Image (cartoon, helix red, strand yellow):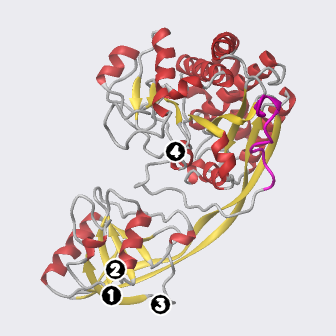
Amino acid sequence: MRAPRTRATAALVSAAVAVPVLFAAAPQAGAQAGHRQPHSTDQAQQARKLAKKLVEKSSGKSAYRHLRKFQEIADDNGGNRAAGTKGHKASTTYVYERLKKAGYKVSYQDFTFHTSKTLREGAAVLSPEARKLNAVAFDFSKSTPEGGLQAPLAAARVDDTPGCEADDYTSDTFTGKIALVKRGTCTFAEKEAAAAKAGAVGLLLYNHSGDQPVHGNLEVPQNAHIPAAGITLAEGQKLAEQVAKGEVKVSLDVATQAVPHKTRNVVAETRGGRADRVVALGAHLDSVSEGPGINDNGSGSAGLIEVAEQLAKATKGGKKLANKVRFAWWSAEELGLLGSDHYVKTLTPKQKKNIKLYLNFDMIASPNGAELVYDGDDSDKTGEGPGPKGSAQIEKLINGFLDKKKVPHWGTDFDGRSDYGPFIADGIPAGGTFTGAEGLKTAEQAAKAGGKAGQPYDPNYHGKGDTLKNVDRKIFDVNVDVIAHAVGVYAQDLSSLKR
């Protein structure tokens, strides 16, 4: 799972043409006009039968062997499986070969992403008194001329959404000046774009807490409009005070370079099932560079492999399915959902329409985890609103299964931090489970599900400690069953999405 959008993350950009990948074949005979489809009651019975069988056959114990393999791959490749590395490529090969052997139609989808290399970074106050600033260049910042640029400073309004809207820049003339903006609420790219639109020639963004300078990330080179750097909260507050009293002149000198890297998604789909009724599931396969990423997200990836293999065994390679099931293992999620975003952008309108739902599984074995189900109907009234039509029904299906298993569960917001994001943006219903990242476990969750209240769901999140030793095998097993149940139901019957 990627870091929050307002936090500095690894720099990136998706920017390549993909090789052919499995999207949607022509509708099969069962989809042709005039062909009699199974009665809805029959479909429901088939769905219950398959779901029960998949839950019985799929297990966290069996899926654990895939986690062990991901750990071995990381150990053999510098301790991680990050996008663009040998460790990630080896992980994709492992998934590809497993699914090919199981009888799926499997393909790679190649694309290119970029990391940002800082060549120069610096800023200073020239007047009313000279002093250096602790400045850090934004990833993918536009470069200043050699030697930097010098200009007066203009401060954007500080409110609940500082520097996010055009009217935050109306209290002063920003044309030809360097904008001073406080961090918070909207993304770094949105703040930079707003400052540029107001006429600023540069941006100094100061932190909202702590004593470190902001490490901003524009995420893609195309988002760069003006040179931008981050400074500390104390530096920003002092500059804002000085600007309120009179002219402050500063210098800014930054230069970055976008470095290309190749990576790939793995996509596998059943040979049977209606191609105009696709049940899609995904999990990101890449780790961060700091560790092997066994929970984040070897766990979701392993869960999909396990259920996909059991589905193939139960249906003779998918020949007995009403609907086509498509599994995807995304790359570069940790760099900004690049793999899933690239995939969705390369779909035609018809191919998008054929995808009836998307299920996402990112971090499903957190060592201090809680069972969190994506809040499709926005019943929790926190964060973002509901998902596209059908998302509420997906949440209901998962909650109902967990209730029958007497597993305590809670809602979690569609906050845009995982690969459901691009699907939701295109109106595709989504859902899934998550067992928590750097957030803190509540007292209620600890009382009902065990674990330590007030401590992170995963204390090893995005660190070298995210290893095979630090996963909760019990909650992992629960979530493998969730995947199995959802696949079994939706592979045979989509009628619940309309209820």
Q: Main secondary structure of the magenta part?
A: loop
| Earlier residue among tags 4 and 2 | 2
Inspect this view and state whether residue 6 appears: yes
Q: In front here: 179 or 68?
A: 179
Tag nearer the camera, 2 or 3: 2
The x, y position of residue 148, in whole percent, is: 45, 87
| Quarter location, residue 330 | top right
Alpha carbon separation for disc pair 1 and 3: 21 Å
Where residue 400 appears, as percent x and y from the top left, is 47, 16
Dot 1 or dot 3: first in sequence order is 3
| Residue lying at 80% horizontally and 42% vertically, measured from the top left | 25
Residue 68 at x, y = what percent?
A: 70, 28
Residue 24 on the magenta segment: yes
Q: CA distance from mark 1 to mark 2?
A: 7 Å
Give me the disc on residue 175.
1
Question: On residue 424, which mark appears?
Answer: 4
Q: Residue furthest front?
A: 34
Q: Are marks 1 and 2 in contact (CB under 8 Å)?
A: yes
Q: Nearer the viewer, mark 4 or mark 2?
A: 4
- Disc 4 and disc 2: Cα gap in Å? 31 Å
| First in sequence: mark 1 vs mark 2 | 1
Q: In the rendering, at what x and y percent does residue 3 appear?
A: 47, 48
